[in-house]
Image (tube, grey):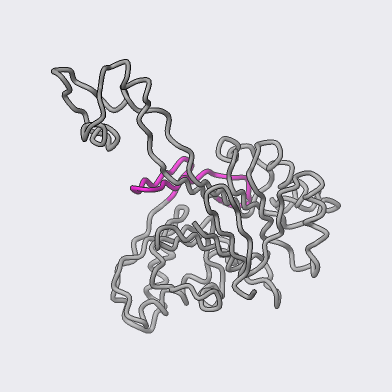
Amino acid sequence: MKIVFLGTGGSVPTKDRNHISIALIYEGEIILLDCGEGTQRQMIKAKLSMMKVSKIFISHFHGDHFLGLFGLIQSMSFFGRNKPLYIFGPKGIDKIVEIARELSIYEINFDIIPVEIYDGFSLEEKSYRIICKKVDHSIETYAIIFEEKKGRGIDKEKIKSLGIKPGPWLRELKEGKTIVYNGKIITPDMVLGEEKKGIRVVYTSDTRPTNVIANYIKDSILIHDATFDDSLRLEAYQKYHSTAKQAAEIARRFNARHLFLIHISSRYKDVSYLEDEAKKIFENTTAARDLMVVEIVKDRINIGSMQD
């Protein structure tokens, strides 16, 4: 798993921070979380192929989170994409996709499939699931949670108690199949243990602090709104955003593995102040920057940059 921060800025971009977009790279697939203006150019800088993007999740319909869709789709068409593209978003995503089709001066030769998300929405794939939870922003907005599926291993004590010996039937049980062993019907639940923990990434873009994602944060990579420093906590509340300190408080309270601060206001030329503020609460904090790459390998988190 790799996470590439394509854009980490707030509503107004700066020379150092593009509008929000994050690429999750998993088993050769690229999933975009939001697609702010300039995303395709950031992908070029990061040497990521836009043709490998299979899914795009739009958290909400403020322009800095979705206006990059139009250029990205047109470029995909220009370069001859023929694979379907799934675009997930709140109610109205079908209208956004229709506008994208109408705006393109090139013929679009691939299917664009809009999928409406809602509170509790879950997409189940073979090796991962993606869950959407509604958060506290000025318009309908969703946190996006990626969970790797690691499956359930064979519980040795269970098979011992059932008198089951090693053999190909164990593989079938692990794959979720029911078998007949020595005349007895054996179901997977009779021999499998708890689901193994995989990588979890919790992305919550624009939001006030909220507990709705609490159950997903433990041991996760938490990517959280940190628009303001804590001296502007009231302004953050009024504008439905969070401060860096509030993001850290959530990370500490719910035992995140690592916290990345994003959606940083253009007023902050030096983000070390925000990072230091958060680190006093939760040590494992990093203020994300454009083109930062986070590689997750087993128990390690390696942080680098495409510009290093």
Q: Residue furthest top?
A: 161
Q: Is residue 189 left or right of residue 245?
A: left
Q: Is residue 111 magenta?
A: no
Return the residue nearer the eye: 53 or 26: 26
Q: Is residue 105 left or right of residue 251?
A: left
Residue stretch rendered in magenta on the structure:
117-141
Return the residue nearer the eye: 136 or 155: 155
Return the residue nearer the eye: 34 or 161: 161
Q: Position of residue 78 (x, y in %)?
A: 37, 83
Q: Quadrant of residue 76?
A: bottom left
Q: Position of residue 94 (x, y in %)?
A: 39, 60
Q: Is residue 92 left or right of residue 260?
A: left
Q: Residue furthest front?
A: 166
Q: Is residue 21 left or right of residue 244?
A: left
* Residue shown at 65% from the left, 38% from the top: 255
* Residue shown at 65% from the left, 52% from the top: 224
Magenta part mainly helix, strand or loop?
loop
Assign the C terminus to one quadrant of the image.
bottom right
* Residue shown at 30% from the left, 71% from the top: 110
Return the residue nearer the eye: 59 or 17: 17
Q: Position of residue 47 (x, y in %)?
A: 50, 76
Q: Residue furthest right?
A: 231
Residue 11 vertical position relative to residue 150 in the rendered view, above or below: below
Q: Position of residue 82 (x, y in %)?
A: 29, 73
Residue 166 vertical position relative to residue 255 in the rendered view, above or below: above
